[in-house]
Image (cartoon, rainbow, N blue to C red):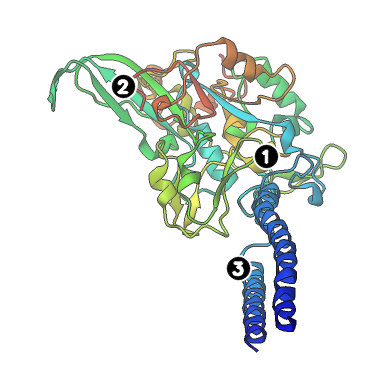
Amino acid sequence: MSSKSHNTNIIRFALLVVVFLILGAVLRWALVPHSFGEYGPYRGHAVEETMSQETIYMGMASCKTCHPKVIENMFSGSHNNHKCEACHYAKSKHAKGGERNPVKLADMAVDTSQDECRFCHLKVPGRPNIRQLLSFEGHLKKLEAEPGSECITCHDPHNPAM
Amino acid sequence: MKNMSKKKKPEKVSRRKFLRRSAAMATGAIMVLMIPKSVKAHLTTSDTKTPGKAHGSDYDWSDHYWTYLIDINKCIGCGNCVRACKRENGVHADYFRTWVEHYIVTDHDHDEEGGKHHEHVYVYSPKGGEEGFYPKEVDGKVMKSFFVPKICNHCRHTPCIQVCPVHASFSTKDGVVLVDKKVCIGCAYCVQACPYGSRYIDPATHTADKCTWCYHRITRGLLPACVTVCPTNTRQFGDLREVNSKIKEVIETQHVAVLKQELHTEPFCFYIGYDHVIK
């Protein structure tokens, strides 16, 4: 009789353990993201989600498909290391279709004011003198031009040397 | 006699049972001990698994280990990188994933705690350099001045991942530290833990945000947006696992430094032209 009740206790305890194991498994399934641990101790799908972000900057090779002459002109001058999308903003909204069937979607936004040129050409202490550095006010005064004149009235932004 | 045999019999069986049960228990214990190993095997990356395969990407992250190189001597502080990063990643107006600092060191004598200093270091970064730099009034004669682009260093032993309580910060197999915005609870422990100030809480999503080295671009064979627009090749990006890797050669053969090396975070963002005043 006593051994029988002893066995029942073991069975009860075993059942309790099984119930806890099942409960644990269900809770884990419900609470832990399913791709957790796929590649490491984090949600695996997070990597793919980051990878699927839209690309905005397309690079110069992509600009060259339609504008080879502009780029050729740029490469022949002092702006030869410039990147189109630095001044013309990002390309992705401008055209689509690639080399075979390019379709223009919208104009490129470009700031033609002095501000765009000041980013590189304003004389600031510490700016390496690897390009033309100047005080814009002084330069325009010397030329007797209006203070707010656009640099591109005289300089070709793609090949600015005069 | 009968009683004796009755008493003896169960004892004999119980010994056999005991041995049998001990064997069963030992087997069970071994199996239980083996579970953590199998879980561990599940958690560590297997060589064949690579993300993006399901979406038609032929990118294999075990073939790459990305690294970043910044040449301070070349930086002109134009801010193209800052503007490009903001547009590419839709970074909130008042926050920066990358920024440029202007250092001006003058000979201006000044008293500070701990005595007289014969060097004054000005560091400023108006809007992260997004709207360009203008001449700044400083005391004393300018001894040296330079621009330092800053970015997440994508450290191998990074404190930001260690402190994350929900496994939202993680390091990919190709060496990029990313944030899982769906899991992040915005506690900002990582923002405090980062010694480089590379992280911030995005006010739109209330989660941690940081530079991803444009992970969506590099996994498609493009360069990060900041590198794409740099006019002086100050910013360079490369793959240490590539055959004849240019960046690997530079790091192995030239004088390069990392920021805050004393913290042993093992950054993968290297600097040429480092100066001791750079923090």
Q: Could you tell me which quadrant the N terminus of chain B lies in?
A: bottom right
Closer to the camera in the image, A43 or B77: A43
Quadrant of the rendering where the C terminus of chain B is positioned: top left
**What's the residue type where badge 3 is placed?**
Leu
Question: What is the distance, in whole Å, between disc 1 and disc 3 at their CAs?
Answer: 32 Å
Q: Residue at x 50, y 26 (%)?
A: A151
**Which residue is the site of mark 3?**
A31
Which residue position is annotated with label 2? Answer: B104
The foreground one among A94 and B225 is B225
What numbered label is drawn on residue B139? none
Q: Position of residue B236 (x, y in %)?
A: 59, 24
A13 up-or-down from B163: above or below: below
Per the model, the C-alpha gap separating discs 2 and 3 is: 52 Å
The reply to whether label 1 and label 3 mark residues of one chain is no
Which of the two discs, 1 and 2, labels the residue nearer the N terminus? 2
Labels 1, 2: front one: 1
Q: Nearer the viewer, mark 1 or mark 3?
A: 3
Name of the residue lying farthest toward the bottom: A1
| Amino acid on which the number 2 mark rests in the picture | Ile
Q: Judging from the image, what secondary structure is the residue with disc 1 in? A: helix
Q: Which chain's residue wears label 2?
A: B
Q: Which subunit holds the residue at mark 3?
A: A
- Reading the image, the residue beneath label 1 is B217
